[in-house]
Amino acid sequence: MKLSNKEIDQIIHSISSIKEKELPIKTLFKITCIAKKLEPLVQAFDEIRKQITNKYAVLDANGEVVVGENQSVEIENYKGFQNDINELLNIECSVDIEKLSLSDFENVQISPEVAIPLSYIIQE
């Protein structure tokens, strides 16, 4: 199966949210296995995202990244930064995961914000 980095990021966030719910053991096992297979891709994504951020960050006189009041990095060339981040988000990765089924979530209340990203890895 091919998933973009954006989709993988969304799936990982949804899995983190859903693991806090009371799930059947089989479902919990499946989503834990999926998360473990996606984790190396998430780590690689984060590493490259940090490199892109540092490439476009405003630096102070000591060469340190300038962090704004809201703890966000100040970006010098926002258009270039956004282009590189979008390119990174759109990269597709091949992953070998067992898809979930709708029956795996029987009697589990899931918000749309969590359910929509999971649709990438659910077969009907």
Image: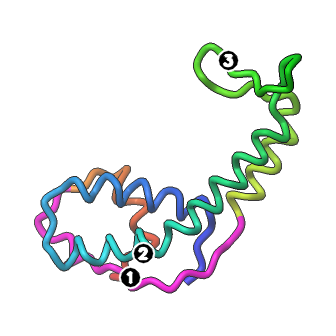
Q: Farthest residue toward the front?
A: 62
Q: Where is residue 55 in the image (x, y as percent from the top left)?
A: 84, 41
Q: Name the residue under label 2.
A: 121
* Label 3: element kind: loop
Q: Name the residue under label 1.
A: 99
For disc 3, the neighbor class at 10 Å (few under 14, some 14 to 19, many from 20) is few
- Residue plotted at (81% across, 31% down): 57
* Label 1: element kind: loop
Q: Position of residue 72 (x, y in %)?
A: 64, 26
The quarter of the picture where residue 123 lies is bottom left
Residue 4 horizontal side relative to residue 119, left or right:
right
Q: Mark 3 points at which residue?
A: 68
Is mark 3 in CB contact (under 8 Å) with mark 2? no
Is mark 1 in CB contact (under 8 Å) with mark 2? yes
- Residue plotted at (62% across, 67% down): 4
Identity, as a three-letter code, of the amino acid under mark 1: Lys
Dot 1 or dot 3: first in sequence order is 3
The quarter of the picture where residue 121 lies is bottom left
Residue 107 horizontal side relative to residue 117, left or right:
left
For disc 1, the neighbor class at 10 Å (few under 14, some 14 to 19, many from 20) is some
